[in-house]
Image (cartoon, rainbow, N blue to C red):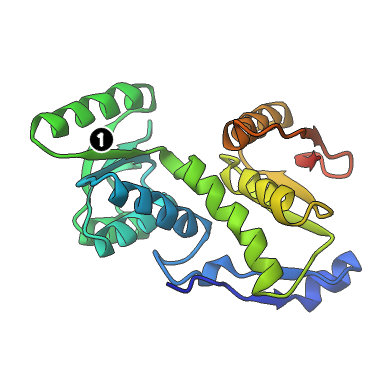
Amino acid sequence: MQHTTPLQHCPYFSALTQTDFYLKREDLFPEGGGGNKARMIIKILQKAKLESASYIITAGGPYSNFNRALALISSSMEFKLKIILYDKNPHIRQESLNKRICDQLGAEYVFCTPDLVSETIEREINQLQSAGESPFFIYGGGKSREGISAYAELIKEIKTKNQFDPDLISTTFATGTTFSGLYAGIHEYSPKIEILGISIARQNEASVSIVLQNLTDFFAPKTVSFSATPSKKTPKGLRCHQ
């Protein structure tokens, strides 16, 4: 299945940054409503198929783009889906567009507060196993080896299918999975590229430790030398070095 997304030149940001600025249009990814999470989910659910899973379990908030993409792709791949929906605010049971899509696709919900997520996941997995189902848990946001692999392969896609070799790649940074995958791909396919992550969820110190752990797990048992440091130019930026 073809999942290549276009590379689009952006005149506005090119003029603003005095560079040749391009956008990798992951919003046009042709599965799951588009976006980086959809690309990860394809890889993750391929693993679930190989393991003969019948039920997918994940956890997330009521407005989650990840949940929406997972519901769409799970449905197309004939998985049943159960979402541990957590929030400490009353709006958890209110409708959002993403949740409405999940509803229409038959997603099941278990509601809880953030402090009870882990034990709720464990309980639901045990109940499904007792009922003869084969559950497959996906960490919220797609944090996984497969999620990292999806974005490692994106670097190869940019080089071979988009015919482009940038000096710098920048992305927003939350769980760190997309950023870690891009870094892994740069290491494998184009080591001269710099990468900059812009944190939208946590401070640099936490971001550094998350990326380093992701990369250590991903490259094991290979011996790879890398480091991650806060960017001096961008207060919430993180740069990786080989």
Measuring 35% from the left and 52% from the top, which residue is drawn there?
45
Side of 127 relative to 196 (left or right): left
Q: Is residue 73 visible?
A: yes
**Left or right for 33, reference 232:** left
Dot 1, crowdedness within 10 Å: few (<14), some or many (≥20)?
some
In the image, 3 versus 85, the foreground residue is 3
Q: Position of residue 134 (x, y in %)?
A: 19, 39
Q: Amino acid at mark 1?
A: Phe
The residue tagged with tag 1: helix, strand or loop?
strand
Quadrant containing the N terminus is bottom left
Q: Position of residue 131 (x, y in %)?
A: 8, 34
Coordinates of residue 126 in the picture (x, y in percent): 18, 26
Depicted 115 relative to depicted 25: above or below: above
Residue that carries the numbered disc 1 in the rendered image: 111
**Residue plotted at (78% across, 33% down):** 227
Quarter of the image for residue 207 reads top right
Q: Nearer the viewer, residue 87 or 104?
A: 104
Q: Residue 30: x and y, percent?
A: 45, 72
